[in-house]
Image (cartoon, rainbow, N blue to C red):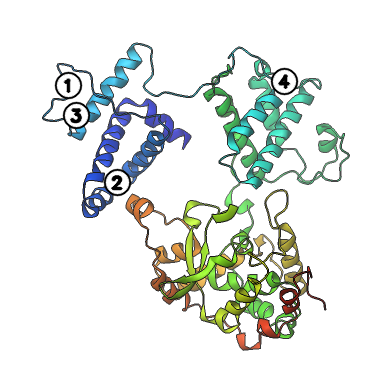
Amino acid sequence: MDELTYKLLNDPSCYGRTMGLLKRYQQMEDFSWNVVEQFLMELGEDESALLEQAIKQHDLGNLNLPAPKQNTNLAITQQNSNDPLAIALAMLQKLLEAQSSGGTVISSQTSKLNPNEDLTLDELAKRFIDSKKASYKPGTVVSTKSKIGLFVKILTEHNHENVPTLSQLNPDSIRHYRDTLLKIPAYRQSFPHNATINDWIRANKPPISAKTAKDSAALIGEFLTWIEADGYPITKSLKTILNQVKKPRKEQTDCRQPFSEGQLKTLFESETYQKGLFKTGAEFWTPLLALFTGARMSELLQLHITDIRQHENIWVIDINTDDEKQVKTESSHRLIPIHSWLIKLEFLNYVNERGKNSNRLFPEEDRNAHGKFHAYSTRFNRWKEQLGVIKAENQLLDFHSFRHTVRTALTDASVQESLIDDIIGHKTQGASIGKRVYTHTQLVPQKKEAIEKLNYAIDFNKIRPWNKHKLIQILRDPTLKRAKS
């Protein structure tokens, strides 16, 4: 996105083309949907990308469509004022005039501080994080603080225990951070609080993964870009030094697997399900819900009672961001029809009775300081492994594997890929901008038909319905945190 933005705002021909697209897009509000859809569908992939970026920049106030300056060659007359090519040429003229006069077409927000103020890195880090809090999820804020905190710690020790200032941020210091980052141990909780970076490295513990190193380097690159964009004096192109921290090769990463038929039978025909030995509603329902929806663990555990509702006379689970709930991406907002097996197992009755004393579906589950449902994840993995459902070497097998399981099952049932994406909450690759921007229908009847095709080699009749389950205790006595054995 940084590269696209740079090209969009600085390449004259690209800028003119983009402004023409933006003008045509704005004119669409006067036409019917059929005309709008035709315009959007005819855009190529690169044009769609340019238009989306232009819309984003325009909404931020960075792009304007002013009346063009009259010119013998490039003037827009009254007769051709709506011609996209003429508008694009006028915008190009505006860009070239600004460049020749040393000005800029794009207005940018700059810091109100004196740009010569030599701030320390920890102060800059605080301002950077504050600028991101509005758009970051709580867990992302915590992760960002951790990564930038490590960056400052490495450079502080390199600077003889003095926190570096902006003027001391140079290629040598960034190279030192890059090279040191790759040696940092993955697990550092056992070290004393006052342990140094060298203490960590000398312990000779396994280093952080290639993915973690790449993610950390990318975040610091974003931090350096923000410093420059906000008008602070900084050496140019420092972030390019971090480009040598490469993404892990595919063979270096563990591959997440769907659950096999045997593993699913082991989980859902286990004694825990047959005898109703779970102690919380989440432990009983969340794996079942994931098996028939492909929803993420956090999407399910944060559900409210009101998120279980009818749409077009079909019971659905509404994945949304109401009441401070969180989703991973924009495409995660969706309605997922409830499979008939969940209804047979008395899920709707559970929702009704749970709603008598809580507005949340699983009030016993809370996020940790990082915004994660870590406690539940730990219990699920422990339960799974106790049953003998264990990952193979170079594989991942966890709660997220249910998403892969559902996707595989729907694919095997010949469900259209774009519909699977709508159910799972993935962005369809190659989807037109019309689908991404304008499609509001949830296709609930089509999703319901697709979800009912989920067919597993599991005897669901062996599962004890919730109303015969010991977890009913927490519903009838809300003062109990967990059901008694």
Q: Residue lying at the far bottom in this picture: please name it.
A: 461
Q: Is mark 2 on a helix, strand or loop?
A: loop
- State the residue position of label 2: 44
Task: Kindly identify the residue that appears in the image at 83 percent across and 38 percent down.
Answer: 200
Mark 2 nearby-residue class (10 Å; few <14, some 14–19, many ≥20)? few
The disc labelled 4 sits on which kind of residue? Pro
Q: Name the residue type under label 1.
A: Ala
Residue 29 visible in the current orientation: yes
* Circle 1/circle 4 CB separation < 8 Å: no
Kindly identify which residue carries mark 1. Answer: 75
Q: Is 442 above or below relative to 20?
A: below
Q: Where residue 230 appears, x then y in whole percent? A: 54, 23
Q: Are marks 1 and 3 in contact (CB under 8 Å)?
A: no
Task: Rate crowding at label 4 as few (under 14), some (14 to 19) or many (20 or more) other CA atoms within 10 Å.
Answer: many
Q: Which residue is drawn at 69% across and 25% down?
A: 123
According to the picture, the residue beneath numbered tag 3 turns out to be 86
Q: Which mark is residue 164?
A: 4
Q: Which corner quadrant of the image does residue 273 belong to?
A: bottom right
